[in-house]
Image: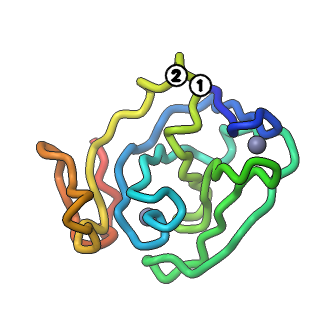
């Protein structure tokens, strides 16, 4: 999979498989995306990222510090890390067009926080908060 930010300064390539894909409705994802995030979990070791990035860290809903990595030129968030050791949550919307279908949503998490205008997609398992075990196939 390949992708990058809006201005093209930050590019990435992922050589490993997607571990999990899902939608997150937590307050932090809402603030950074205006609705919910579509994320692909990948092993950090399988990702190569080029271009200068900046980071913003904040304690996430899991209680662990979550670092959000974004392009300082265009402000687009590329991925976050820290919720699970060695795992990066890649923002699916940053994938290049030809890789968009690599995102396979499997669950919606933090749906307790959903506003009425951004309800979880029908047909997917939902979790009120972060599931203790990552939902996986
Ligand atoms: Zn950029
Ligand atoms: Zn979230």
The residue carrying pointer 1 sits among few (fewer than 14), some (14 to 19) or many (20 or more) residues within 10 Å by Cα, namely some
* Discs 2, 1 touching: Cβ within 8 Å: yes
The quadrant holding residue 50 is top right
For disc 1, does the CB lie below 8 Å from ligand 1? no
- Expressed as whole percent of the image width and height from the top left, the position of residue 59 reads 56, 81
Alpha carbon distance from label 2 to label 1: 6 Å
Vertical placement of residue 53 versus 82, above or below: above
Q: Is residue 86 left or right of residue 11?
A: left
Q: How many marks?
A: 2
Residue 99's tag is 2
Q: Nearer the viewer, residue 100 or 115?
A: 115
| Color theme of the render | rainbow
The quadrant holding residue 11 is top right
Vertical placement of residue 34 versus 6, above or below: below
Which residue does the image show at 39% across and 69% down from the upper left? 26
- Expressed as whole percent of the image width and height from the top left, the position of residue 121 reads 20, 47
Report the residue marked by disc 1. 96
For disc 2, does the CB lie below 8 Å from ligand 1? no
Task: Name the residue furthest front.
Answer: 117
Residue 84's tag is none
SS at circle 1: loop
Which quadrant is home to the N terminus? top right
The residue carrying pointer 2 sits among few (fewer than 14), some (14 to 19) or many (20 or more) residues within 10 Å by Cα, namely some
- Expressed as whole percent of the image width and height from the top left, the position of residue 58 reads 61, 78
The quadrant holding residue 61 is bottom left
Q: Nearer the viewer, residue 111 or 30?
A: 30
Which residue does the image show at 57% across and 31% down from the upper left? 95
């Amino acid at each position: 999979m390949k992708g990058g930010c809006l201005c093209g300064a930050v590019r990435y390539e992922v050589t490993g498989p997607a571990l999990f894909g899902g939608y997150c409705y937590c307050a932090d994802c809402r603030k950074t995306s205006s609705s919910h995030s579509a994320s692909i979990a990948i092993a950090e070791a399988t990702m190569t990222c080029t271009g200068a990035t900046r980071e913003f860290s904040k304690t996430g809903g899991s209680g662990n510090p979550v670092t959000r990595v974004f392009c300082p030129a265009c402000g687009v968030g590329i991925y976050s890390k820290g919720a699970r050791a060695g795992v990066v949550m890649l923002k699916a919307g940053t994938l290049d067009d030809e890789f968009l279908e690599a995102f396979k949503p499997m669950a919606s998490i933090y749906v307790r926080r959903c506003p009425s205008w951004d309800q979880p997609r029908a047909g997917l398992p939902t979790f009120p908060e972060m599931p203790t075990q990552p939902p996986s196939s």
